[in-house]
Image (cartoon, rainbow, N blue to C red):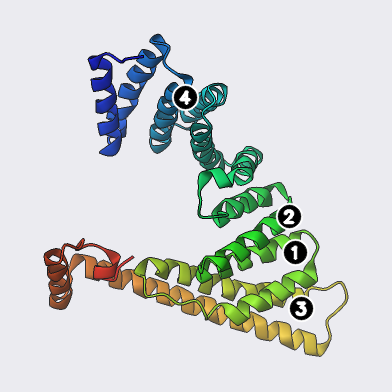
């Protein structure tokens, strides 16, 4: 079916507003597109994509209920219209909306479908972040054993793709799932694994700095967890065990203090470099522009 020129022009205006991040302008334009496409009885897959796009815009405007209504309508149209790619695109958006709303069972459901069909999403292989998200959706539902399985798989896949920082971070989350499922011995082994590996991941990418800092904080907190494990048994701990618990507690507190001091110093330094860059930093940015690079790229500024 051929669209009239004014409908094509309307769609172009809507996409232009979305591309420019002008969400307040984009929402009514997409509404007009939806009305036009419905009125012309265009293919359901096309109408679904318009509802999905408006749902995305409404998410950006913090209009959660309206966004969910759009995404539910998009899902129904995409499935009825035999548009599998559109269906998966809707599920990716809707699952993130459910996560933001704390509707964990619904988020888990959508993520489960995405995991089952992940070969349709990418030719690159399994996506560890889908399993990581599902694990996090399962934890508030106290589905600890299922969450532990997802964490295990996500950790393995992250190691396979060489993302060592996120792999160790995932192990720190796995610890809680193991404790929750009653696998105390496995939880302690996972803690020791973090202690052995947390200093190994390294990166010269400034965007990885917050991840490395997060890893430092979680490693410190695990020392406190282990202290509680050692000293919090049903029977009174032996003097040796009590001493070990005290040592773990002291290490955890010290490392948390160091983490907080280093984080505060980094934020102060970054603010200074953004507001008042040195001559050398200005020169590096000038050379970057001459070389065709983005002068505000993290690799140029050294800032995340």
Looking at marks 3 and 1 on the same chain, the residue that comes earlier in the sequence is marked by 1
Quadrant that contains the C terminus: bottom left
> Could you tell me how far apart the alpha carbons at marks 1 and 2 are, in whole angstroms?
8 Å
Residue under numbered circle 2: 144
Q: Name the residue under label 1.
A: 179
Q: From the viewer's perspective, is residue 37 above or below residue 295?
A: above
Q: Residue 252: in sight, yes or no?
A: no
Viewer-side residue, 37 vs 145: 37
Disc 1 to disc 2: CB gap under 8 Å: yes
Q: Give the mark nearer the N terminus: 4 vs 1.
A: 4
The disc at residue 230 is 3
Q: Residue at label 4?
A: 45
The one of 167 and 59 positioned closer to us in this rendering: 167
Horizontal and vertical percent position of residue 160: 56, 67
Question: x and y percent of residue 195 in the render?
Answer: 62, 80
Query: In this picture, is 159 found above or below 243?
Result: above
Q: Where is residue 239 in the image (x, y as percent from the top left)?
A: 81, 89
Could you say where residue 291 lies in the image, as x and y percent from the top left?
A: 15, 66
* C-alpha distance separating marks 3 and 1: 14 Å
Please report whichever mark, 1 or 2, sits nearer to the chain's N-terminal start: 2
Query: Compared to 121, does 264 lie above or below?
Result: below
**Mark 3: secondary structure:** helix
- Counting other residues with Cα less than 10 Å from the Cα at mark 4, is it few (<14), some (14-19), or many (20 or more)? many
Q: Does the residue at mark 2 contact the one at mark 4 (Cβ under 8 Å)? A: no
Mark 4 vs 3, N-terminal side: 4
Q: How far apart are marks 2 and 4 (CA)?
A: 38 Å
């Amino acid at each position: 079916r051929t669209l009239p020129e004014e409908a094509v022009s309307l769609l172009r205006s809507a996409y232009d507003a979305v591309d420019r991040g002008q969400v307040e302008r984009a929402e009514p334009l997409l509404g007009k597109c939806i009305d036009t496409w419905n009125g012309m009885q265009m293919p359901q897959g096309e109408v679904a994509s318009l509802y999905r796009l408006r749902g995305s815009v409404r998410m950006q405007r913090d209009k959660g209920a309206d966004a969910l209504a759009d995404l539910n309508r998009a899902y129904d149209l995409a499935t009825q219209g035999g548009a599998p790619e559109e269906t998966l695109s809707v599920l990716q958006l809707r699952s993130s909306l459910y996560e933001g709303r704390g509707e964990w069972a619904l988020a888990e459901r959508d993520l489960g479908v995405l995991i089952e069909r992940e070969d349709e999403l990418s030719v690159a292989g399994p996506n560890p972040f889908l399993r990581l998200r599902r694990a996090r959706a399962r934890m508030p539902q106290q589905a600890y054993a299922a969450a532990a399985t997802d964490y295990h798989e996500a950790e393995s896949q992250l190691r396979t793709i060489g993302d060592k920082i996120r792999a160790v971070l995932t192990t720190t989350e796995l610890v809680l799932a193991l404790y929750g499922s009653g696998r105390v011995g496995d939880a302690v082994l996972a803690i020791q694994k973090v202690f052995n590996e947390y200093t190994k991941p390294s990166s010269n990418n400034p965007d990885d700095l917050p991840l490395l800092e997060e890893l430092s904080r979680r490693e410190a907190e695990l020392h406190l967890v282990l202290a509680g494990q050692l000293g919090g048994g049903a029977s009174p701990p032996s003097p040796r065990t009590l001493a070990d618990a005290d040592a773990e507690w002291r290490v955890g507190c010290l490392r948390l203090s160091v983490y907080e001091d280093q984080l505060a110093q980094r934020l102060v330094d970054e603010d200074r470099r953004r507001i008042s860059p040195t001559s050398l930093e200005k020169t590096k940015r000038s050379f970057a522009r001459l070389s065709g690079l983005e002068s505000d790229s993290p690799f140029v500024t050294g800032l995340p």
